Image (cartoon, coloured by chain):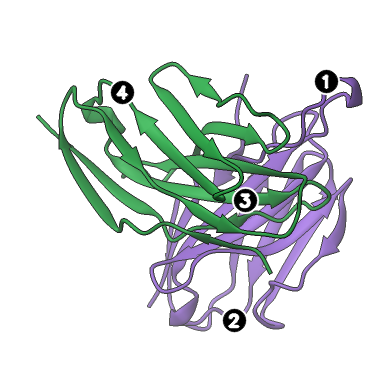
Amino acid sequence: DAGVIQSPRHEVTEMGQEVTLRCKPISGHNSLFWYRQTMMRGLELLIYFNNNVPIDDSGMPEDRFSAKMPNASFSTLKIQPSEPRDSAVYFCASSFPPPRTSGKRETQYFGPGTRLLVL
Amino acid sequence: AQTVTQSQPEMSVQEAETVTLSCTYDTSENNYYLFWYKQPPSRQMILVIRQEAYKQQNATENRFSVNFQKAAKSFSLKISDSQLGDTAMYFCAFRRGSNYQLIWGAGTKLIIKP
């Protein structure tokens, strides 16, 4: 069973360029998360989707960042224009609600990440 | 607000030894979940083990086990018979039962030496 798929795995771009990161969640998962990881700030939640709807985007740094989830199997995170301080590893994670009778709760499964370098 | 503290920035042990990584958290909630994630040099975030706060029994996954002390708000990870492939950053994370947000610790860098 395929895990969360992210592309590209590495991206090097110049300041001012548009960057688009892509994510395919695990099939059947209805929650999707975008994170950013840097040495200085650790892991930060950028945005959370549930059933393709953005629920919490309070972590999105500024208007240069936007995220979409047009359907249950695809999401994008766009940075326009990019800046050197956006350099980080960007993770996508997905989860699903287990049956209520199982007593279990959601666990987030992470993709391999996209390492972004903005020069 | 909930916080997660990992007091060991880096640890190093010999292969086959047992190592324990510490994690403490602060919350007034009674229903919550605790996780250990592993991040090897490949940068992939991998779930290692999960503990539900309402369960008194410590979670175990093969060589990985936790010592969950609810009253002390402590959630340590024990790795038995450590292997070179265990070399990674290990993150402790907390989640309220009614919330989707993970609160992360700063991580512990674990190095397994041959």
Query: Considering depth in this image, is A69 or A42 the residue closer to the camera?
Result: A42
How far, Cα to Cα, is label 3 from label 4?
Answer: 23 Å
- Vertical side of A76 occupied by B59: above or below: above
Whole-percent x and y of residue B34?
61, 43
Residue A31 quadrant = top right
Chain for numbered disc 2: A
Report which colour depicts chain B: green
Instruction: From the image, tell me which residue sits under label 3.
Output: B94
Chain for numbered disc 1: A
| Among the two numbered marks 1 and 2 on one chain, the one whose residue lies closer to the N terminus | 2
Provide the secondary structure element on which disc 4 rests: loop
Confirm or deny contact between disc 2 and disc 3 (CB under 8 A). no
Q: Are marks 2 and 3 on the same chain?
A: no
Q: Are marks 1 and 3 on the same chain?
A: no
The kind of residue on which mark 4 rests is Ser
Instruction: From the image, tell me which residue sits under label 4.
Output: B80
Report which colour depicts chain A: purple
Instruction: From the image, tell me which residue sits under label 2.
Output: A81
| Among the two numbered marks 3 and 4 on one chain, the one whose residue lies closer to the N terminus | 4
Provide the secondary structure element on which disc 2 rests: loop
Circle 4 crowding by C-alpha within 10 Å: few under 14, some 14–19, many from 20: some
Whole-percent x and y of residue B60?
51, 21
Q: Quadrant of the C terminus of chain A?
A: bottom left
Q: Are marks 1 and 2 on the same chain?
A: yes
Instruction: From the image, tell me which residue sits under label 1.
Output: A102
The kind of residue on which mark 2 rests is Pro
